[in-house]
Image (spheres, rainbow, N blue to C red):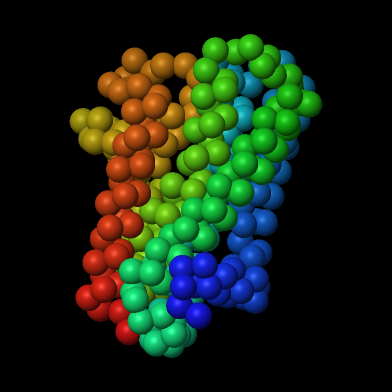
Amino acid sequence: MTSALAVLRSERVKFTTLRSQWITPLVAVALTVGITTLVNLAYGQVDHTPGEDPAGGIYYGLLFGHVAVACIGVLLLGQEFNTRMIGVSLTAVPRRGRLYGAKLAFGAGLGLLVGLVSTAGSFLAVATTVGLDPSTPGLGRSFLAGVLYHPLLVVLCLGLTAVMRNFTAALGLLTPMLFLGTTFLAAIPGVSEVGRFLPDRAGLYAMQTQADPAVHYGHWTGLLIMALWTAAAAYGGLRSIRRHAG
């Protein structure tokens, strides 16, 4: 039962049997699409355009929904640390890298599904409320970046949870540091340049359809920066699992 496919199947079973885990993706989609719809409905009564950059209206709900997306990554591993079931999981799957890899693969797949539904729903919400021109330059790239942002964020948070090895610390500190902290840094003169290279700032910039003169990298580079942060977190989590868990 320790084959890669069997371990991946066991992660699916864990996910479907814990209410907190399967409800969280639904909350992420509901927040992202719901807030985007409501904001564009209200805004459309004043102006028929969602702002200078259409992405501002499309991804408005993501500013709230991505907190729930981060929680997906924390819950996929943090629950086992919280209940001390990680030792049982490692007994069932002695190869720690295989267990951790299955969690990463499942988390990435789940994040990809959430990203596809949330992004498509947000685009549809804008198109049916204030209108959306499909020929807008960069819109296709923005859609792809919006989809990929979700699995990258899930894996990033899962990896950092493995590094912390503590559910409460990960849930209580990770989401505020990633989102409230980076937003605060981006607003401080002289520090904002550093803030733009943090994972969520770079990922969100990748979704914009227009270039920002204050950002000294391209949209695809923004997604690459987030991917590098994610890879570093995943690697750090692997080293932590191999050294400390169990």
Question: Which one is nearer the viewer's eye here, 61 or 26?
Answer: 26
User: Quarter-wise, where is residue 13 in the image?
Assistant: bottom right
Which of these two is toward me, 8 or 197?
8
The residue drawn where x is 61% and y is 61% is 24
Residue 158: x %, y % from top left = 41, 61
- Nearer to us in this view, 159 or 180: 159
- Residue at horizontal 30%, vertical 64%? 237
Is 124 left, or right, of 24 in this rendering?
Answer: right
Residue 201, picture quadrant: top left
Location of residue 137 with respect to 221 vertically, above or below:
above
In the displayed structure, does residue 211 sit left or right of residue 241?
Answer: right
Q: Where is residue 73 in the image (x, y as percent from the top left)?
A: 47, 60
Q: How many marks overall?
A: 0
Taking the image as shown, residue 54 lies to the left or right of residue 44, namely left
Q: In this view, does 185 lie above or below 97?
A: above
* Residue 186 showing in the rendered view: no
Q: Where is residue 21 in the image (x, y as percent from the top left)?
A: 59, 68
169 w.r.t. 204: above or below: below
Q: In the rendered image, is residue 13 in sight?
A: yes
In percent of the image, x 26 and y 60: which residue is there?
Answer: 236
Q: Residue at x 48, y 41 (%)?
A: 149
Q: From the top left corner, tell me how far across and down residue 206 is, in percent.
A: 44, 29
Q: Quadrant of the C terminus?
A: bottom left
Task: State which quadrant residue 58 falls in.
Answer: top right
